[in-house]
Amino acid sequence: MAKTALYEYPAELREEFEATEDIHFRDGSRATAADVWHFMTEIGPKRYPFAYTQKKYAGSRLSRDIHLPSAIKNHYLLLTMNDRINKSRENGAPVIFVQGGQSVDPYYAAGGIALRPASVGLWARGRHEGLGLNEEAIRSRNQREKANHAISFEACQTAGYANIQEDDLPVDMVAPFTCLRCSDISYGVEAHRHGPNKAVKLMNIDYPMRHQADKPWAVEYFARNLRRLTSEIGKRAGREVTDDDLTKEIKLHNEGRRLAIDTAELWWSADLPPTNGVDRRALYQMGGMEIHGDPSASLTVLRESNAYIRERVKRGIKAEGVVDKPIRLFVCGSCVFPNDFRIEEAGAIIVGQDNHWSDISTLVAEEGDPYQNLAHAILSYPYEQSIEKRAEWTIEQLKKSRADGVLFLYQWGCNTQSAIARMLCDTIKRDSGIPTMIIEQHEGGSEQSEQLLNRVNAFIEML
Amino acid sequence: MSIKRNFFAGVDVGSLAAKSVILEDGEIFATGLVPSGVDSVESGLKALNLALETGGLIQEDLTYIVGTGYGRVSAPYANKAVTEITCHAKGANYLHPSVRTIIDMGGQDCKAIRIDQDGAVVDFAMNDKCAAGTGRFLEVMAGVFKVKLEDLGALALSATELVPMSSTCTVFAESETISLVARGEKPANILNGIHHAIANRISGLFARVGIASDVFFSGGVAKNTGMKTAIEEALKVTIVKPEIDPQLIGALGAAVLARSFSKKEGLWA
Amino acid sequence: MTVKTLEVIRKRLDERPDELRKARANGQKVVGWTGYNVPEEIIHALGFIPIRIAIGGDDRLVEVGGRYASSKNCVFIREIVGAFAENEDPYIQQTDVLAFDATCLQNFRAAEVIEYYFKRDVVVLGVPRNFYWEEGQEYFVNEANEFTRLLEERAGAKLDTVKLAASVALYNDIRKTLKSIYFFQAAKDNVISWEEVFDLIQAGDLLDKKEYLILLQETLIELQELQPDPVIEADGADGRIFISGSLIPRGDRKLIGIINAVGGRIVGDDLWTGILPHLDLDIKEISPAGVALGYLNRTPHAALPYLDLESDRRLKKLHELIDESKAQGVIYHTLRYCDPFTFKAKETKDVLAKSGIPLLEIHTEYAGSDYEAMRTRVEAFVEMIKIKAESAAEVAV
């Protein structure tokens, strides 16, 4: 197959882009739009050529909606992850490996940086410069293979081990919310005890299950887990963490969550999709304020984008490359996501997902004991409730997003979501009549198999 | 008065081939290799008879026979049955006493074996139920590309690029291969990716048992030059050049054990 | 030489399903439980008949269960789900209430699936991952109190402390007697095999507890008569194997059969369906909290993560049991998608290697298709440890 040239942002866009807002970082520094433009057009292609691939099958291509500033700024923040995390660490902020689908307020309140597996992967990727798409895929697969050797080939949760133990990524703590959406997490934490990197502090932030939000002792237990967590992070950050610190952080993160909810409701209300699937997903996730390893940066980009989306919806502007009346798909499950580009080529668009959205759309009470408030909110994540309750919430999201169908995707080896898939889909079909389809993905990576995409396309045709 | 000659045979019935080696005292006297059929007893006998015929012997000339491989459990012609793990260890040690690690890739199993200076097994690990890294897996891949099994390795070595491939199992790798073919990726590049993915998977077995020089590569897949190169790269080792067909090592080890067992049983002095 | 009481126990097991049917007709309720930390004494003291749900070895049921759960759940869990789907197992048929715990999260998911699809009444006991923290223990005490309350509702009666004390005493006697019996199977010139003791332990999951204790005591007396002075010692090259890893429930005897067929002798285990749960259970207070903490503070199950390798009590116990049984090698049994044990296979191998104990992992499911592949691995392992023992003996001479 002939090698394709790298993608280039059109030069005539420069002036328009440079007039957009700066990105504000947590440490008080900022990146102007001109800085972003320079990085994305001059530096990025040299350091990270894989990101500029135009290969049709790559799911990680840059968004082509170039008039949406958040699209470029999001990619900028992702590609500068290594530079920024290293700088923050040098300034004393410990980095903590967490889990997808959880909020990160307490980590930042204690002076740390919380990164979920995908973000840790981005940081690790940033340390290996000059790689093309295939080379980068081989590098990350080799790391994963090594982690599988050290744990098991049936392990799905190997990203932490692969990067921290096999690639010496200087993560300071591994402390995810355990049991949340995945039964492998606590084993993934435990696996580090036999790895070569002994410096990393291990903790399970134990998420109780079964009517957990209704049990005062479960809320209390989780709150005490959170207190231990902030204390451990505080020790590493060299500070004492007060309740006020956490309250302030909750308020900041609530702002992100509210903005994401508002953005989603705007997006869902539009007759024509105001963004493509890649950008929509990034915007919703910015509300979780974890995606870039800097909540302030995510918040500034999300604020600016929200105004753009409002304007596009008001004026009926459709995102480039999206068909007029696409089939609207809602994705359930965890950790995997179909290739948005291919979905859109097939005449559909992904309008939302339960994974991450469950925690992003859960607001935290701001008055009273912040640990109790946070614990109660976290134990109330709809994704973690009984099947009936989770289905009820999912159907509500399906209605809001006007979804035509549900794709339930899970990763090969995922014990938890695979066991829930049929129950959830059966309940959704029973109570809403919306068609569902369950698909297992066999391997992660930048490309998905034709078999998987074939199933998705057949589902789209059926709808 | 003629001196009685002592012959010892090893018969290794695997899933794809049956092999036999006859030793006369300490030296290889004759060998036989035939494809395995559905009847493992018949396959073993065919390989044994081929070696006997080559050496101009009859079965009654043999002092002792050890059966190994999957066919060992039903080998009425054998005096004793021993697993191929123990036999590969003995066979490699017989040929190259400096060998401490064996990679054996046969029809349906892949093994990592660590041995000591006497050829005794110190530790071993085998592939899980998945067939990645076996002769059967490569047969499937040869089928996908419609090339001969023996040409796969050379084709992989002619690649201009390394395509990232999964190696979880035959079924997944096959579907991934079909996706890549559909997308126009060159067969040589895909095969290069497959060989490297298998080599990576094999290196996982060594994560369990460790690796020490010298390293020997046995089994039918050892004849695949592409696989040999990929394994050398993945494990960062140099594989010892075999003195005989690497597919015969299990049978050779069985013959070595036949000699040793028969001596212990007082059948010769 | 046969132990006669074992025959009596086998006969009583044959009669047990009918007995349960009659007991239920007379108004008694049966609680089917599964989970390493389910405090069975509480179930017993409330007047329920406790029956452990632990079946395996039936690939067809695994397939059925996978349709409701998924093919990515461990085969044991899939078989349990499959058994509820078919409802043909004579013990499962007799259960009125189910009690599951969340030690293994797949067990917890199975409870959800069974509740959802088969409309069974399931009580779930939450189990902390941070079980060694004070906060974790407090959470578990609260969960145990809630578990008791839910069972009390179903029993229509409050838990009586006197009855709980009696149940605890009965179970303590059972554990003590089992431990004494277990010693005999590992002895030189043993009069009872590990396999027989393993069956005997599992009989206790189903039989009436008072009767079970009497049968155990009779077995022990018989053993003491047959072998007054048992001694555990390694017998040159007898291929002494210790089994560790995923549970081996009733119905699944594939691996055990293979070890025997290739000339290995099992002399010890730390299986959840073997001796392990009966060891080191110290109930300090007669209350749901006291019983629950007794369970939680035993040797922990591998499903509960422990973050420091050096002080891991589970691995320490494994070492201790291997030493006691004078085993020469460990066969580490992992069921397909049984993450708690599968993920720790390499680590356990590395840990034991430091003490010179070889370990073979056998990764399997209930299908018979891997029988020959397993046999080759086990046979080679037994050959390896026998050759090693022979060489050691030659050096000693």
Image (cartoon, coloured by chain):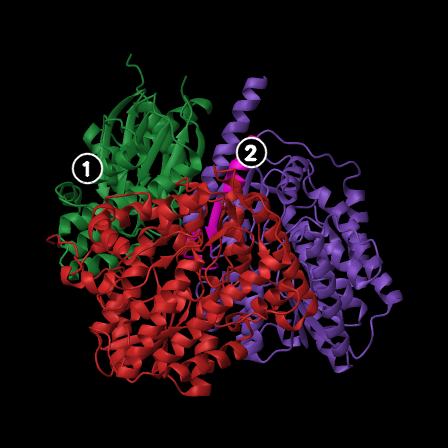
Q: Is residue C167 left or right of residue A343?
A: right
**A53 relative to B12, above or below:** below
> Label 2 is placed on what type of residue?
Ile
Considering the numbered disc 2 on the image, is that residue within a helix, a strand or a loop? loop
- Residue at the location (52% across, 73% down)? A382
- Residue at the location (18% across, 55% down)? B143
Asked if residue C14 shows in the view, the reply is: yes
- Residue at the location (12% across, 42% down)? B158
Q: Is residue C3 left or right of residue B5?
A: right
The chain whose colour is red is: A
Q: Position of residue C134 (x, y in %)?
A: 72, 53
What is the chain identity of the residue bearing mark 2? C
- Residue at the location (43% across, 55% down)? A294
**A1 relative to B121, above or below:** below
Q: Position of residue B67 (x, y in %)?
A: 36, 37
Few, some or many C-alpha atoms within 10 Å of disc 2 (few <14, some 14-19, many ≥20)?
A: some
The chain whose colour is purple is: C
Pointer 2: what residue? C357
Q: Quadrant of the N terminus of chain A?
A: bottom left
**A442 relative to B238, above or below:** below
Pointer 1: what residue? B225
- Seen as rendered, the residue at the extreme top is B1
Q: Is residue C322 magenta?
A: no
Disc 1 and disc 2 in contact, CB within 8 angstroms: no
- Marks 1 and 2 sit apart, C-alpha to C-alpha, by 37 Å
The chain whose colour is green is: B
Magenta region, residue range: C347-371
> Label 1 is placed on what type of residue?
Thr
